[in-house]
Amino acid sequence: MKLTPESLELNLPKLERRLVDFIRGYIEKVGAEGVVIGMSGGLDSSTAAALCAKAVGGGRTLGLILPERETWSEVDIDHAKAVAEKFNMPHALVDITPIVQSFYGSIPIYDSADRVSNGNVKARVRMIVLYYYANKLNRLVVGSSDKSEVMLGYFTKWGDYCADISPLTCLFKTQVRLLSEHLGLPKEITAKPPSPSLWPGHLAEEELGLGYDKLDPILYGLEHGMPLEEIARQLQLNIEAVRDVERRSREGEHKRKPPLSANPWEKTDLHSRFMNTLKYWAHHASTQK
C-alpha cells in the first residue's frame, strides 16, 4: 500500500450529497424539530454547520457561539456569525464564563495551574449548554469532531465529542478542509489553524507535535494496518514520531468507547480492542467512498 496525496482524495460532490442525506435522514427518523450545533468559528464546526443547513434548512439549524473570558476572541466570534449568516442560520452568543467560574469555585481540589483539567471543564460546560437548548427545543446536538481527532483521542471525554450525530468522524482533518472549500466557506476559516480554545494560545498542531498534513497520512496507514516502520519510511519521518501517534491513538481508546462493562467470560486485551477499533474505522471509511 502506498501513502500518497491521492490516498486521501475525495469525490467532494458525492461526499456532500451523502453527508447531507445522512444528517437529513437521521433527523427525520427520530422526529426532531431540527439541530443545535456549537460554533467556534473554526474549520470543523463551520463545515458541520454548513452541512446541517443544507440538510434540514438554515432555519432549523441553531448555531450557539459559546465563548468564555480566558480565550475570548472577537475574530472567532465574527467568523462563526459569518457562517451562520451565509447559511441563513439563527444563532445566539452565550457567554459561559459565569458557569465555568461557578464550577471552578465549587470543586474543592480546583487548581488554577492545571490547564488541561480546567480546559476540559470548558468543553463539558459547552456540551451542557448545547444539550439544554436541544432538550428545550426538541432538537438533536450535532458534533463536529473529525476522524483525526477521534483516532488520536484528541478531544474532551463527555465534552466536544459528545453529540447525537457526528457527520465528520468519517473524514480526516485535511479532508474536512477540502470539503469546507467545496462548500464555499470563507478562506479565513478554511485556512485557520485548528484550536480547541481550552486555554490562551492553544493550537492543536503545536500540542500534537505534527501538522495534520503529516498526522493524517500516519493515521491512514494505521487505519489500514500498515507496519509503523513502513509508514515512517514512506512518509520520510522519524520512527519515533510515528510511534508517538500510534501510542496516542492506543491510549485514547477509552475516550472513543462507551463505559467498559466487566465481562469475566471474555479474554481480551487493550491491543485487541485497539485493532478492532482500527477495523471499525476502516469499514466506516469504506462506506463513505
Image: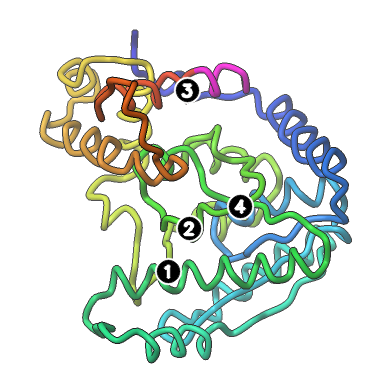
Q: Which residue lies under the disc numbered 1?
A: 197
First in sequence, mark 1 or 2: give its number.
2
Q: Position of residue 87 (x, y in %)?
A: 80, 58
Q: Is residue 239 above or below residue 53?
A: above
Q: Which residue lies under the disc numbered 3?
A: 280
| Amino acid type at mark 2 | Trp
- Magenta region, residue range: 283-289
For label 4, the crowd category at 10 Å Cα-Cα, with few meaning under 14, some 14 to 19 and many 20 or more, is some
Q: Position of residue 157 (x, y in %)?
A: 42, 55
Q: Mark 2 touching mark 4, by CB under 8 A?
A: no
Residue at image coords 52%, 48%: 145
Q: In the visual, does 228 lie left or right of 184?
A: left
| Amino acid type at mark 3 | Tyr
Answer whether residue 190 is magenta in the image: no
Residue 67 appears in which quarter of the rendering? bottom right
Quarter in which the C terminus is drawn: top right
SS at mark 1? loop
Residue at image coords 59%, 75%: 66
Q: Position of residue 18 (x, y in %)?
A: 74, 28
Answer whether residue 284 is magenta in the image: yes
Q: Which residue lies under the disc numbered 4?
A: 163
- Spot the residue most to the top: 1
Colour scheme of the rendered structure: rainbow
